[in-house]
Amino acid sequence: MRSLLVLLCIFLHMESTAQSGTITGIITDKITEKPIEGATVSLSDRTKNAISGKDGSFRITSVPVGRQTILVSYVGYESTSIPNLDVTTGKDLFLTIGIAESFNKLETVVVKASSGKDVAINKLAAVSARQFSVEEVSRYSGGRSDVARLVANFAGVSAPDDSRNDIVIRGNSPVGLQWRIEGIPIPSPNHFSTLGTTGSPVSALNPHVLKNSDFITSAFPAEYGNAIGGIFDLGFKSGNKAKHEYTVGVGAYTGLEAMAEGPMGKRNGSYVIAGRYSIAQFLGSSGGTTAPPIYTDLSLNINFGKSKLGDFSLFGIGGYAEIDLIGKDAREDDLFAFKDEDGFPKSGFSVIGLKHTIPVGANSYIKTTVGGSYSFNTIDNFRYFDYQTPRENKLTNIDIENNTRRFSVSSFFNSRISSQFNIRTGLLLENYRLNATLLTREQQPDDDGDGYPDFNNIIDNKGSFTILQPYAQGQYRLTPSLTFSAGIHTQYFSLNDQLVAEPRGSLSWAFNAKNTISFGYGLHHQNVAEPLLFLNEDVNGELVQTNKELKLVRSNHYVAGYDTRLGDKWRGKLEVYYQQIDKAAIENTISGYSSLTEGAEFIFSTDKSSLVSKGTGFNRGVELTLEKFYSRGYHLLFTSSVFESKYKGSDGVERNSPFNNRFVVNVLGGKEFRTGKVKKNVFSIDTKITTSGGRHFTPIDLLASNTAGYEVKQVGQEYNEQYKNYFRMDLKFSMKLNHRSKKTFHQFYIDLQNITDNDNTFRNQYNRLTGRIDVLSQIGFAPDFGYRYQF
């Protein structure tokens, strides 16, 4: 009997210890980023706690699996809560928690639990900013583990194109977005990206190596420049400094995945490295084409630990992709392939950087990042002229070779002058180099009389420029509830020797515990997209880059917001904005063209030379967010935007931009059910419904197209018509299994995208084989699936 009792006790102990996880991390000062020793970190029910050590580290073991909330308190600092932490048995949950010094250092301010997602990590971003987490990227239905598709759920963002992850922010072209990693701008981190674009069909960013990051949509703080649409400010997470952990997985879009992390060296360093390889080539057609894509990517972050010279870390990301678009295999409704063409696109990119942080005195530090990037895309395209006739002839049709190189240095000094006032001043230096060639028969004459369009060299460009961006900004807490931020960003553009100064400012007033109003303003500039800047024009027999002197596009942002706590775990936010744009590139002859309309396709216009900086435009709208943060087993998110996006070309006519969808509505929700004998496993159901107005487009001139043999748009009717409204519903089922006796974790999911198989319009396209206009539909019903194993 005694033996049975002993065995029962051992079994119960295994159940209680094995089905638990660990929460570990570092507590830092939110402004100085210095570790805080002696902070108390505890679960919300106070059953377990830890005290941060000299290096700010803490570790709470035997934490029950499932959703947890932790509380952080320290004398002289505002108490903070971090809710909705998903604890599992397979992997330690690592957190970097910054806490803010109290307005009065001698008192401890208690703040009620807050999700924190509504507050940006960058504390100088007081308006139109939100942070996102890896858990959100994985949780929401229809996301394909893509951070770009995640932010499409946020108010003010439109992405009604299933085939690409372009981000349209408040009516701006996707070109207005800037991607950043660890403080430096990078090329588009996507597979199959092309020169000058910011989106593509497949993301190369592995969300599992990212830490919580910021997404900013208006009136950016002074440290951000050369963007008028938005900022994706990403950072890599640190590896587990206590033990080695591993993850393997597979997914329809993410492919085969392997990830490792753990401690490194004797200075409390760490590493994290992850690689993925597509499996689409084994599953068959997907993404709107019969051709299976092949892509792979690698991400890493190596922290060398602390030394007398400061903290050093090495980070990198790279990707490669290719696809064979074979005409004989193409469907009639193929989005990217044509029956009379064979195309072989390839693309790739890489980013490598070294980050260094060193303290300066008790309340300051200097952070410097040095990095380089490379990107390329090539297309070899062959066309079968006189297709399916006795005279059929296969000729090289398009030959594209593009590559860019960028070297960047970012350095800033950050200091807390007092508990009320902090400053940040620094600079960003970028050197950009471009090589681009395009030889094509498309839309070319037959001057040599061989019966086929001539194979002409349309683009043969080499160019470079340097951008220098010094800035200074500060934040002052006038009262515990009233905060004012202001700064100045300057930008020098070497291509035309233009120097601009951009004031930025925001004011936030929490007039009671539940309600906050905010105001923001920012002046922003951005260079015209590189494919347009370096276009050649034949001037008296000599090729001249006639767009090099184009001015920086200028944009004034005005925004006002109201944030309210509607109840326990409920939040509402309303923002009103106006964006005024001028100095956009337009033609010097009368037309409806503007550079503000570029960026939503794989290529830019190739016939827009001798442009002038006289174009204008505006975006204005209202955004509403209603959100219930996860509690009681479910979460809800409702976002809506009503907006208008217009521009003027050289003809002076005010037109809809192609991105003027007019409205976007997202409804997301999810419910978790605990299963198993001891309720340690989780079955979840998540859904998403999206509807928006269709994009505007220029109608095709069918008669002129049949005469020319290629697609010709109606002159003077630029973006006068609109595709039908977009609608899509996704449904996701997921199962999380926490092992009873081992530190392992399994997750399975199936994501049914466009479950109603709704017919959303992709575009109208001239078919030269039939002489008709085809209406191509976007991707219909498309299931996604995945499995992850952590140990």
Image: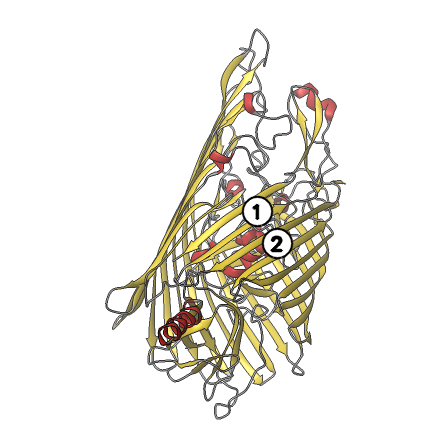
Q: Residue furthest front?
A: 1
Q: Residue at x 65, y 82 (%)?
A: 513
Image location of residue 267, percent across then percent down: 26, 69
Report which residue position mark 2 lands on.
Answer: 152
Vertical relation: 389 (above or below) 565? above
Name the amino acid type tagged 1: Asn
Q: Where 124 falls versus 230 (above or below)?
A: below
Q: Secondary structure at mark 1?
A: loop
Q: Is residue 519 visible?
A: yes
| Residues at circles 2 and 1 in contact by the CB criterion of under 8 Å | yes
The correct choice, above or below, for 293 with respect to 577 in the image is: above
Q: Please identify the quadrant where the N terminus is shown.
A: bottom left
Look at the numbered disc 2 and give the secondary structure of its residue.
loop
User: In the image, residue 174 lies at what x, y percent?
Assistant: 58, 49
Give residue 450's position: percent from left, percent from top: 53, 10
Front-lying residue, 457 or 171: 171
Q: Which residue is mark 1?
A: 165
- Position of the C terminus, as image quadrant, is bottom left
On the question of residue 300 being in view, the answer is no
Whole-percent x and y of residue 139?
A: 56, 57
Q: Amino acid at mark 2?
A: Ala
Q: Earlier in the sequence, mark 2 or mark 1?
A: 2
Q: Pointer 2: residues within 10 angstroms few (<14), some, or many (20+)?
A: many
Of 657 and 168, nearer the camera is 168
- How dense is the environment of label 1, judged by Cα within 10 Å: few (below 14), some, or many (20 and up)? many
